[in-house]
Structure formats: structure tokens, C-alpha cells
Amino acid sequence: MLNIYKIPVPTPYPVGPVNCYLIKNRPYTLVDPGPDTGEARSSLVSGLEVQGVALKDISRVVLTHYHSDHSGLASWLSEVAGARIYLHRYELRKLTSNYDFYQERLSFLQESGLPTVVLREILEDVDTVKQPVLPSGGITLLQGGEILGFDGGSLLVLHRPGHSDGHICLYDQLGRAFLAGDFMLEHITPNPNMEPDPCDFKKRLPVLSQYLDGLDTMDEIGACLILPGHGENIDDSQSAVFRAKKHHLERLELIASLLEGECLNVYQLMRVLYPHISGFQIYLGLSEVFAHVDYLVAGGELSKTEAGGIALYQKPLVHNII
Ligand SMILES: [Zn+2]
Ligand SMILES: [Zn+2]
């Protein structure tokens, strides 16, 4: 039986605190330690103290994905506790000093029809939290399917892309607890971030279908308790899956209806859906739209053409054959 404790760690982001999980079975393990801020460090230390655990007792840090609110303190824990870091192999390059988030996505942003002035607005909305960089050693790369052993239990590693291509979840098969990271959250659906295919950076990954495929596995997994990366625990996995699917289905229908008799680019669609957002939120809005139009194009429900390097989408006309 695994003893899993939640330690909420503050973040400066609108999403609020991140849930770090302490697995208090040897080797003591932290899942998603939080962002690298002074406030987060002291919250984590006091949260561990409540459990009678000192920093030096932490042997492993597992990262569900690379986002700084989850992964920021991994390097520090490796330094102060000698903890080994575990993460999916696709996330490693995003936690190195030469990773350039926007450079990898520049061709997608240009393809969206985004005006230069708005691109500048996104680029100028700089994250104040230091971007995490992992140490060069003491790392174990995962791909999904591994079992992390503990004294008294184990966690199965499950690859669940869609929010990030190397996102993993962890499943305690004995206790039927599912550590979800950002894969499942109580009140919000994770952003299906536009992500280049690690095998061919010119291509976008089909992030929405990857995400929906992941949701489809939840029934068969049969988790009794979802422990998410933010917010409260979810004890009804079926309803949470239903809500997430409904959100995306409605969004797909809305986007398809906006393209009936209209030919629009991703930026124009994003402005219809989110007229008042600014800065980095625009990037997230574009990601959301790309995920849905890519899904509709792959399913033959939208046609895609190109003019001057910008992709244009339209609902194909249905011809009645008499
Ligand atoms: Zn995230
Ligand atoms: Zn998150």
C-alpha cells in the first residue's frame, strides 16, 4: 500500500497552486515538486516537515511534464537531496538551457495568420519564473510502461500526451489512485498545446486526438481516485472524462459551424472565440484552435488550403447527389 500525501505548492500563475505528491514509502519520492520560487521552496519544506520528512530523505523526483509550475524545483532537489529525476524522454530537451519554446513553434504561429504586432505582444509577455534546466546527470528517462518500485507498492508509468508530448501519469494499481498531472483536472481541461513532432519539427502532433485517446483508456484503468496536478481530488473518473470529452466535442462543433460558408485562418477563429485575451493567453488560444482544426481536417470535416504561407480552413460544401 502506498502512502500518498498532497502538498499544495504556490505558483505565480492564474492556475493557482500546483499539487506536489509525496510518496512516503522507501525510496521517498516527490511527484511534481513545483516552480522554482522562494515561496514554493519554503511551502514544500514545511509540507514535508508536517509529514516528518526532511529534504535529504527525498530519493526520487518524478515529473509528469516539463511545465515550470511542475518541474522547477527538480534541479534544486537533485542538488540538495541528491534525488534522481525521472521524466519522459520527450520532455528532456525542453528542460535544457538551449531550448527555445517559440523558435520551435514559429512556423506554426506564422501559419496561423497572426499579425507581427501580436506576435511581438506574445513574445514580450515574458514568464517571470526562471525556466527550469535539469542537471546533466542523475536523470532516468521514461517512455511509459515502466514500474517504479517502492517498499510496499509500485507506480505504473503511463504515457498520456496531448497537453505536452511527453506527459506521463502514474498509477498505483493496488490503491487504485491515479496521479494525473495536468492530464485530468476537476474544473478545467488542459490546453492541447501545439507541439512539433519530435521526429519532424515541421509537423504538428495531432495533440487533440492523442489527448482523447488517453481519456478513452480511463474506463479500462478503473481508477477510484484521481489525484490531479491542480485543485481538488476527483473521485468520479467517469464524469470527469465525460466533461472533458463534452468540452472538446462542443468546441469542435462550434469551430466547424464558424467555418460554414466562411474561409478563416486560425488567428481569425481564435479572435472570434476569445475576443479579449492578450499576451501569452493569445498563444494558448491559438494552440486550442490549432488542436481542433487539425482534428477536423484529419477527420475530413474541414478542408485546408494555403495562401501566402497562411493556412485557411473551410467546411466543405455538401453536394446532394440526386
Ligand atoms: Zn501543464
Ligand atoms: Zn499544470
Image (cartoon, rainbow, N blue to C red):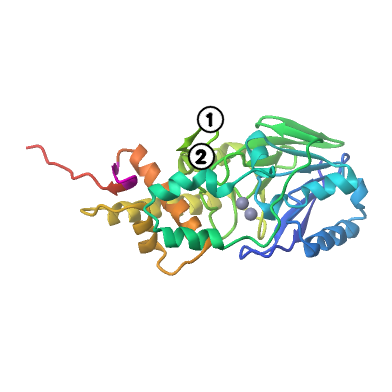
Q: Quadrant of residue 174?
A: top right
Identity, as a three-letter code, of the amino acid under mark 2: Pro
Seen at 14% across and 41% down, the residue is 319
Seen at 40% across and 67% down, the residue is 275
Give above or below for 240 relative to 215: below
Along the line of sight, the residue nearer the viewer: 229 or 79: 79
Q: Please say whether residue 159 is one of the residues in the magenta stretch.
A: no
Percent x, y of residue 140: 76, 33
Give above or below for 275 relative to 166: below
Report the magenta residues as a range: 301-311
Q: What residue occupies the far left of the structure in this picture?
A: 322
Give above or below for 246 relative to 12: above
Percent x, y of residue 60: 82, 41
Along the line of sight, the residue nearer the viewer: 121 or 91: 121
The answer as to whether callout 1 falls within 8 Å of ligand 1 is: no
Quadrant assignment for the N terminus: top right
Res. 196 mark: 2
